[in-house]
Every structure is written in structure tokens, then in C-alpha cells.
Image (cartoon, grey):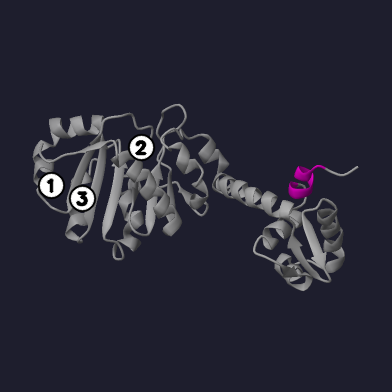
Amino acid sequence: MKKSLLDIIFASDKRKNVLLLLQDGVKEMDDILVSLKTNRQSLLPQMRMLEEHYLVSHTLDRYELTTIGKLVVDEMAHLLGIIQPFENDIDYWGSRNLDFIPSHLFGKIYKLRNCEIINPDLTELFSIHKSLNPGYSLSRSVYTVTTILYPNFEPIIKELLESGLTLHYIFSREVFDKIKAEYQAVFADLIKNESFNMYVYNKNMDLLYFTFDDTHSLTCMLKNNGEFDHRFMLCRGHDPVDWNRELYEYYLKDSVPVREI
């Protein structure tokens, strides 16, 4: 009796990795052995199982995916891509409120696969923006969506503006009300600067903040019970920046520009 395809695909790392390797096209057995760092004697039984289940075919010593194999591996690769960010720190992801992420971006969450969870010292908690500093010299703009206003926000914003960056802020309604009540003069002056763009989002936002420039992103999520801890996710590279840019656009479409306070 044949095993289920799920067992064939996922019960062996060798078989799974062979299928993913063949997704790129036909491979010689010697190339497969080198890529998987194994030997022929060890791999051949796994190759036979893949052939017996019509996932792989071979001619002489060249192996390729069958039509069924291509269909299965395309979906398998997508699933593994979705899983990978969570496997990096499942305790962090599992304890976060992810309701702030729109459904279409869950399908692209593989773009966050190389992110790391940072646990900063309390003394650094209000200087998190410095984690992005290596990228500032290469960046033109910084985008932020936030439900909080750090105590030292004014020198941070001025520092960024003085460095020649264009800033785009989307504030929650609660933060905007705080700004009008306590910091009206500060922000009235800021919005006169053409490099400072301010918006208010009138719907609920189930997160603390996220921010990104051209090369980095930072995200600080709420816990499932609504509490805050100071751990945040730091990402580098084009994929997470693209993902965060789409998330920013999602919030921007329901935000109102602030021209005066």
C-alpha cells in the first residue's frame, strides 16, 4: 500500500529538499547529491519513493518533476514560505495580535522570513529609531504608522528632518487628539515643513507602531490580551520593505491628511 502524498513530501527532509531543488528544473544526480550534501546510496531509496508516487521522473541520471510534482511543489513552496517567518520565533508570533494585518498581506508574509525579534534594554526603549540609522544615509523617506507618541518624539523628528529625509506619519485618532491637546504648537510648526507629511486614521489599529525606510523596517505589535511589551521585529532588505509599504498603503487609503492644527 502506498503512503499518502503528505507523508512522502513532509516525513523526510531529503525528499522535501529534492522536490524543492527540482522546482528550478532538471537536475543531474551528481548535482543533487552536492546540493543536499549526501551520497547516492542514501538518496536513491528516497528518489524511488518519489518516482513511485509520480512526483519525480528520471531519464538516465537526470531527474525532473512530473506534472503532478510541479503542481504539488508550487503549493508546498508557498506553504513553507508562509511558515518560515513564524518558525523563526513562534512564541513571539503566537502571542501577538495580528488583526492589524489585512488578509491579502498574510499571503505575502513569507517576505518577513529573515526578520529578527529584538528585546531592547529599557534604557534604549525610547531610542528605537536608532536601529534604523545604518540605512538612513541610503534612504530618502521614512514612513510610520503609530498609536503612540514617544516622550522624546520632538528631537527624533527634528533629527530626521535635518538629515534631509521626508517623513510620512499616520497617527491614530487617539494620538491625534493628544497632539491637539498637548503638542499643538509643536505640530503646527512641523506641518509647515514640506518634508513632514501627517495623516490621521480614524479606524481602529490593533498595533503599537510600524516604521520603515528604504532598507529597514521595525514593527512593534500588541500582545493577544492587548498588553504591550517592548520587543519589536527588525527586518532588513527589499522584501520586508515592500511588504511594509503595502501595509502603509492599506492604512493610508483610509487616512485623512492634516493640513493645519
Element under disc 2: loop
Label 1, label 3: how far apart the Cα atoms are: 9 Å
Q: Which residue is drawn at 52% across and 52% down?
A: 113
Magenta stretch containing residue 172, yes or no?
Answer: no
**Do the numbered discs 1 and 2 sit on residues whose CB atoms are within 8 Å?**
no
Residue 102 appears in the rendering: yes
Residue 162 spot, x, y in % from top left? 17, 59
Above or below, 214 against 98 in this view is below
Residue 69 versus residue 256: which sits nearer the camera? 69
**Sequence-first disc among 3 and 2:** 3
Magenta stretch containing residue 9, yes or no?
Answer: yes
Residue 122 appears in the rendering: no
Say whether residue 255 is left or right of residue 6.
left
Q: Mark 1 points at which residue?
A: 190
Say whether residue 161 is left or right of residue 50.
left
Q: Residues within 10 Å of mark 2 (few under 14, many from 20)?
A: many
**Sequence-first disc among 1 and 3:** 3
Element under disc 1: helix
Kindly identify the amino acid type of the residue bearing the numbered disc 2. Answer: Leu
**Do the numbered discs 1 and 3 sit on residues whose CB atoms are within 8 Å?**
yes
Kindly identify the amino acid type of the residue bearing the numbered disc 1. Answer: Leu
Label 1, label 2: how far apart the Cα atoms are: 22 Å
Q: Name the residue under label 3.
A: 157
Kindly identify the amino acid type of the residue bearing the numbered disc 3. Answer: Ile
Residue 105 spot, x, y in % from top left? 46, 43
The segment highlighted magenta reads 4-10
